[in-house]
Image (cartoon, helix red, strand yellow):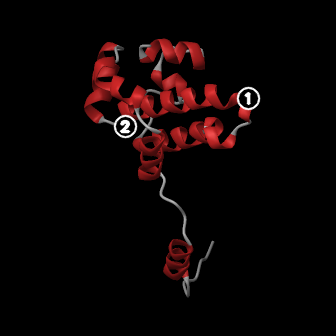
Amino acid sequence: MPLIEDCERYFHCSCLYDVLSIEKTATAEQLKQAYKKMSLLVHPDKVAEHNREECTRKFQILAKVHSILSDAEKRQAYDETGIVDDENNSSMDDASPEFWEQYWRALFPRITIGAIEKFLASYRGKMFIS
């Protein structure tokens, strides 16, 4: 099914920006935050079993929307035409669960003890004055 039709079916809107609840002028950081927020709501591992199939599809749609809007060329083409080139995105329909895990982790790396210690070390000994 074409992406726009999927958006209408699962998110009740035909605009990619509306799927993520952001403005057309959203920055890359705002886009990333909106994607993270929405994907956590529909992540298949975070929902009840009876919602898992629908949420898996929603999660995949969100990834497609994010992949278009986070690519400057694809975003500009969408902004200018309102059309999504589904042929370039159709291969994502058949992507394995491992692909989606890798895609998610590329955007949001796991938080490890080492990462926390590194973060703490960068602030240790610094004074904060408000």
- Residue 85 position, x and y percent, is 30, 18
Vertical arrangement, residue 113 with respect to residue 72, above or below? below
- Residue 28 position, x and y percent, is 40, 42
| Gap between marks 2 and 1 measured at Cα | 31 Å
Q: Nearer the viewer, residue 102 or 36?
A: 102
Vertical arrangement, residue 60 with respect to residue 4, above or below? below
Q: Could you tell me which secondary element the residue under label 2 belongs to?
A: loop
Q: Amino acid at mark 1?
A: His
Q: Nearer the viewer, residue 15 or 5?
A: 5
Task: State the residue at coordinates (52%, 82%).
Answer: 121
Vertical arrangement, residue 95 with respect to residue 6, above or below? below
Task: State the residue at coordinates (36%, 30%).
Answer: 68
Dot 2: within a 10 Å radius of its alpha carbon, few (fewer than 14), some, or many (20 or more) residues? some
Which residue lies most toward the left here? 73
- Residue 129 position, x and y percent, is 61, 76
Res. 70 mark: 2
Please say whether residue 84 is visible from this viewpoint.
yes
Q: Describe residue 28's horizontal placement relative to residue 80 as left or right.
A: right
Please say whether residue 85 is visible from this viewpoint.
no
Q: Could you tell me which secondary element the residue under label 1 belongs to?
A: helix
Task: State the residue at coordinates (52%, 44%).
Answer: 33
Res. 50 mark: 1
